[in-house]
Image (spheres, helix red, strand yellow):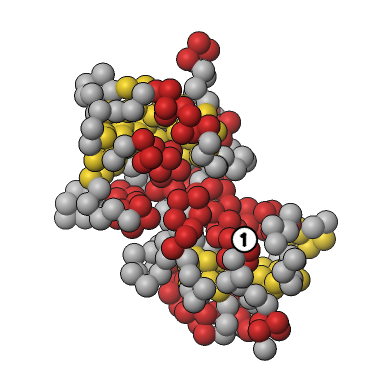
């Protein structure tokens, strides 16, 4: 049994931060205390924790010597400003933002897939993009069935992927739409209720938006396959929580049998098959919301290619796409003896 650890949650008032606190309430590893951090405007607010409350502290004035693990979920700018400082103060940082994901010295981790690349000296770990995690949870178990040549993916991304204010925007716009009122826009550039649009991130010179670029580059890094061909189209849909994705996996050789695919998923941790063709029941965001597993279904061969396997997946991107994956990384590092309280070290 390891000694209790002191935890800092940066961005504790946000959509991911609130999920982190709920997961930490269950003590995935022994916890001595939790510091809830956010911006100055939230300082002093009370957040529920274990039947009591945590008082939110201002990130700017927090002394990271008071923590052993710091979970960052407050945007890339805050991670860049405060993440390296937290490491200097002796913390292990697990960062949900994109700030250092592609830094070659920073492990980018989905524990079920590449947890083994974390070493005892690693103090800064990046949590991947949520769409990449959900896609890879379905794709990685298939690698034992044959070499993968190419992925073709379309995403159906929920409001929660853009944070708590975006979720409120979808709810408010839905009410306004039904009441025949003008739609209030704060986060998204287009009407969101009863609509969908190409992902709201900037487009680069190749015509890819930032989300698509992240899925491609981060997936290659996580799988350790710099040449993997990936074509992804990211779309925002008016779903409150949990991302879905239609995925075509193209194998170098013929696609594996559907029976072997189902066997691979039956033994894959963190994956649950929902593949009931008789009742037309396949992964749905409402059923993926609030659960730890990524749902995988509509498993079928590609009628247009002998190399193709088609899937449809839904996963709670606030959980496996963010908070849960981060806590699993911490759990793995505690169990491996890579994180110990500094009182024990000194
Ligand atoms: N949502 C997802 O599905 C998801 C998935 C993977 C990764 N991420 C990443 O996780 C991070 C948080 O996302 P989210 O969806 O939880 O966003 P969110 O709901 O908008 O929450 C943002 C959090 O950051 C805090 N924050 C903002 N500016 C700050 C500042 N200047 N100083 C200190 N704290 C500040 C906010 O505190 P206040 O309440 O005080 O403003 C809030 O706690 C982002 O980097 C995002 O890219 C999100």
Pick whichever, 142 or 194, lies toward us. 142
Question: Looking at the picture, how far across and down is residue 343, in whole percent?
Answer: 71, 84
Residue receiving disc 1: 331
In the image, residue 104 above or below residue 279: below
Q: Residue at x 69, y 73 (%)?
A: 6
**Looking at the image, which residue is at 39% across and 48% down?**
132
The answer to whether any part of residue 177 appears in the image is no
Disc 1 is placed on an element classified as helix
Horizontal side of 131 relative to 240 (left or right) equals: left
Does residue 205 appear in this view?
yes
Q: Farthest residue to the right: give it.
A: 51
- Give the vertical position of 180 relative to 105 (above or below): above
Quadrant of the snapshot with the C terminus: bottom right
Label tally: 1
Query: Residue 80 location in percent, x, y?
Result: 43, 74
User: Is the residue marked by circle 1 packed among few (<14), some (14-19), or many (20+) residues within 10 Å?
Assistant: some
Query: Vertically, is 312 above or below 30?
Result: above
> Residue 337 at what x, y percent from top left?
61, 70
Q: Is mark 1 within 8 Å of ligand 1?
A: no
At a point 57% along the width and 48% down the height, the residue shown is 319
Q: Is residue 269 above or below residue 300?
A: below
User: Residue lying farthest bottom?
Assistant: 346
Q: Quadrant of the N terminus?
A: bottom right
- Outermost top residue: 278
Instruction: Give the x, y percent position of residue 122.
Output: 48, 73
The part of the image, by quadrant, that contains residue 231 is top left
Residue lying at 34% horizontally and 69% vertically, measured from the top left: 103
Q: Which quadrant of the structure image shows residue 11?
A: bottom right
């Amino acid at each position: 049994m390891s000694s209790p650890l002191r935890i800092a949650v940066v961005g504790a008032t946000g959509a991911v931060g609130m999920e982190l606190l709920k997961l930490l309430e269950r003590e995935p590893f022994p916890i001595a205390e939790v510091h809830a951090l956010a911006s100055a405007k939230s300082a002093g607010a009370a957040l529920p924790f274990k039947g009591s409350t945590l008082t939110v502290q201002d990130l700017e004035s927090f002394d990271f010597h008071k923590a052993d693990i710091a979970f960052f979920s407050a945007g890339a700018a805050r991670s860049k400003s405060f993440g390296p400082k937290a490491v200097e103060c002796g913390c292990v940082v697990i960062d949900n933002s994109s700030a250092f994901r592609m830094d070659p010295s920073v492990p980018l981790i989905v524990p079920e897939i590449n947890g083994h690349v974390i070493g005892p000296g690693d103090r800064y770990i990046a949590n991947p993009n949520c769409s990449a995690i959900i896609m890879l949870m379905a794709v990685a178990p298939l690698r034992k069935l044959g070499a993968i040549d190419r992925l073709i993916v379309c995403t159906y991304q929920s409001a929660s992927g853009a944070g708590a204010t975006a979720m409120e925007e979808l709810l408010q716009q839905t009410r306004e739409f039904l009441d025949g009122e003008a739609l209030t826009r704060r986060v998204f550039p287009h009407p969101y209720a009863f609509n969908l649009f190409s992902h709201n991130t900037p487009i680069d010179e190749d015509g890819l938006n930032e989300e698509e670029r992240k899925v491609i580059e981060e997936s290659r890094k996580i799988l350790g396959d710099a040449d993997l061909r990936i074509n992804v189209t990211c779309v925002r849909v008016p779903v409150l929580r949990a991302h879905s994705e239609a995925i075509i996996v193209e194998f170098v050789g013929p696609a594996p049998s559907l029976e072997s695919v189902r066997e691979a998923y039956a033994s894959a941790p963190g994956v649950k098959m929902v593949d009931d063709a008789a009742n037309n029941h396949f992964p749905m965001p409402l059923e993926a919301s609030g659960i730890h597993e990524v749902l995988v279904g509509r498993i079928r061969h590609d009628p247009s290619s002998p190399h193709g396997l088609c899937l449809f997946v839904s996963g709670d991107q606030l959980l496996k796409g963010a908070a849960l994956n981060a806590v699993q990384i911490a759990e793995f590092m505690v169990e491996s003896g890579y994180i110990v309280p500094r009182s024990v070290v000194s």
